[in-house]
Image (cartoon, coloured by chain):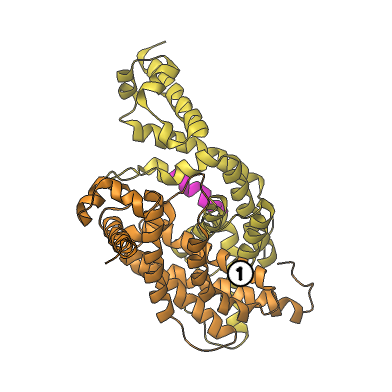
Chain colours: A orange, B yellow
Amino acid sequence: MDTAARREQLKEALVDAALRTIAADGLGGLKARALADKVGCAVGAIYNVVEDLDELILLANTKTLEQLETILSMAIQPGEGTDWAVEQLVALALAYLDFATAHRRQWRALFDHRTGEKPVPDWYRRDQERLFAYVERPVEQLRPKLAPAERSLLARSMFSAVHGLVALGLEEKLQFLPPQTLRQQVVTIVTALGHGFARGAYGAAASGGPSPDW
Amino acid sequence: MDTAARREQLKEALVDAALRTIAADGLGGLKARALADKVGCAVGAIYNVVEDLDELILLANTKTLEQLETILSMAIQPGEGTDWAVEQLVALALAYLDFATAHRRQWRALFDHRTGEKPVPDWYRRDQERLFAYVERPVEQLRPKLAPAERSLLARSMFSAVHGLVALGLEEKLQFLPPQTLRQQVVTIVTALGHGFARGAYGAAASGGPSPDW
């Protein structure tokens, strides 16, 4: 095996070890020394294959995003129209809730990790964006006249709203919610949001009122 | 001044010092030694007036909730009906965004603080609940038939959705959003949510469709 292949193999092993550590103990449990021990390399060798622990965390988070994408893609059904779009948004939101519930620490690491002054690298942004595409398709059915940039923004805002529900619900910040109640609230909020958007696109115009500025 | 009054005065001074520390440096900056120095008492004296730093943080967070309540109460307009309710929800959401933007560290401390195994005390829960009452009134106009417990739950879920938008927006977790864009997204999402709820209460029945299970 040549040097490049060995480096790649070590990098892969380190990312796997980082992901397992995050899944078991959360971001706070990640230490260079322990990772080196896990993969059987010297601490210094880590910095031959990644720039710093931040890069390793982002690479591990990318694996989490891939797992999330697998779950989201299973929620996708073919279709079109308002009812399909609302059902699709609800299915995606519930898939997100299920993923966050089942992989709590990995999910939390996606949001708790801060790269500080350094910008998030482009490859990580692209991995995030692939996920938002799942939300953009139903949003396009609900608001067909939106420009792509606005649709993309709206898909992110819808995701942020669902994330707020899931995050405050799972972390029990406001109150303890039984899992079934939290699920039902996600359905309620996303259904209202979806139908509210469809009304924004069609309802206000159909009723002869002024076109909404949103 | 008797002992009880002196204790009360020290407690008040410590809470003020904790709040100023959180506002300047965030939760991470809070240390017993530095607080004692600020108010001019011995470190041990802190534990004569509060049980632990957790209690001091909750007392400081209560002051933050009071400041937030002042801001929210200024967004309240008298009225009734769907349009009033939607406008009211939008005004409350924007007031929340403004508060979080202006008092970033205090706002973050409300959510970052974890009391660990100990349950959050009842007096703190009651302070939170007073704030949700502002959201429950417009929700009642949108969904008048909901039982009080369901309305209360829905108000919290709406808050969680707005919080997700504000949190991911301000912390720039998904992308950088100019403040005006984030504002507009809050208006868009809350308007859609509000009208979507009103439709859930009236629209589906009026159109002859099945009553929605949400």
Q: Quadrant of residue A106?
A: bottom left
Q: Is residue A31 visible?
A: no
Measured from the top left, where is residue B130 in percent x and y? 50, 47
Q: Which residues are magenta?
A: B126-134
The answer to which of B121 and A8 lies nearer the viewer is A8
Q: Looking at this view, name the residue that lies furthest to the front.
A: A2
Left or right: where B18 falls relative to B134: left
Q: Classify the position of the N terminus of chain A by image quarter.
A: bottom left
Q: Residue at x 46, y 82 (%)?
A: A76
The answer to if A17 sits in the magenta stretch is: no
Nearest the camera: A100 or A27? A27
The front one of B187 and A158 is A158
Q: Which residue is mark 1?
A: A152
Q: Amino acid at mark 1?
A: Ser
State the residue at coordinates (45%, 77%). A91
Magenta: main secondary structure: helix
Q: Position of residue A146 (x, y in %)?
A: 69, 74
> Which residue shows up at 45% across the image and 49% down it?
A114
Q: In the image, residue A211 lies at what x, y percent?
A: 77, 72
Image height check: is B26 above or below B12?
below
Q: How many marks?
A: 1
* Structural crowding at the residue carrying mark 1, measured as other residues with C-alpha within 10 Å and reported as few (<14), some (14–19) or many (≥20): many
Kindly state the secondary structure of the residue where label 1 is placed: helix
Residue at x 53% of width, y 38% of height: B66
Q: Quadrant of the C terminus of chain A?
A: bottom right
- Horizontally, residue B149 falls left or right of residue B198, namely left
* Badge 1: chain ID: A
Whether residue A186 is visible, yes or no, is: yes
